[in-house]
Image (cartoon, rainbow, N blue to C red):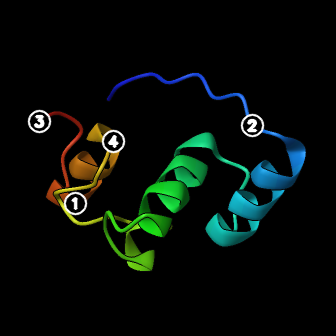
Amino acid sequence: MIPVIIDLPYAMLASLEAAAQSGEIGDIVRAALVAVGHGTPDHVAGVRSDRFATLDERREIAGTTRL
């Protein structure tokens, strides 16, 4: 994963939180990427496809504690 710092006006942040249905920064960034055409709404919340999954989500998908 790549850490990011974002500086958004409150209205933009609120809009992305609504789209992500979450206050988690990872979900908010994913919602923004989906809005511009990277992935689908299914990639924002819940377990993601392997392509867009975090390391923890990949572990969960694989059913292991270590990859």
Residue at 66%, 70% in the rendered image: 19
- Circle on res. 9: none
Residue mark closest to the camera, 3 vs 2? 2
Residue 6: give x, y in percent of width and height: 63, 29
Q: Earlier in the sequence, mark 1 or mark 2?
A: 2
The residue carrying mark 2 is 8
Q: Which residue is mark 4?
A: 56
Residue at the disc numbered 1 = 61
Above or below: residue 27 compared with residue 35? above
Q: Which residue is mark 3?
A: 67
Q: Position of residue 65 (x, y in %)?
A: 24, 38
The Cα atoms of the two marked residues, 3 and 1, are separated by: 11 Å
Quarter placement of the C terminus: top left
Q: Report the number of discs.
A: 4
Specify which label sits upstream in the sequence, 4 or 2: 2
- Tell me if mark 3 has few (under 14), some (14-19) or many (20+) residues whose alpha carbon lies within 10 angstroms of its own: few
* Contact check, label 4 and label 2, Cβ < 8 Å: no
Q: Which residue type does callout 4 highlight? A: Asp
| Amino acid found under the numbered disc labelled 2 | Leu
Looking at the image, which residue sits at the far right? Answer: 10
Q: In whole angstroms, how far apart are the C-alphas of marks 1 and 2?
A: 32 Å
- The CA distance from mark 1 to mark 4 is 9 Å
Amino acid residing under circle 1 = Ile
Q: Nearer the viewer, residue 44 or 7?
A: 7
Foreground of the two, 60 or 28? 28
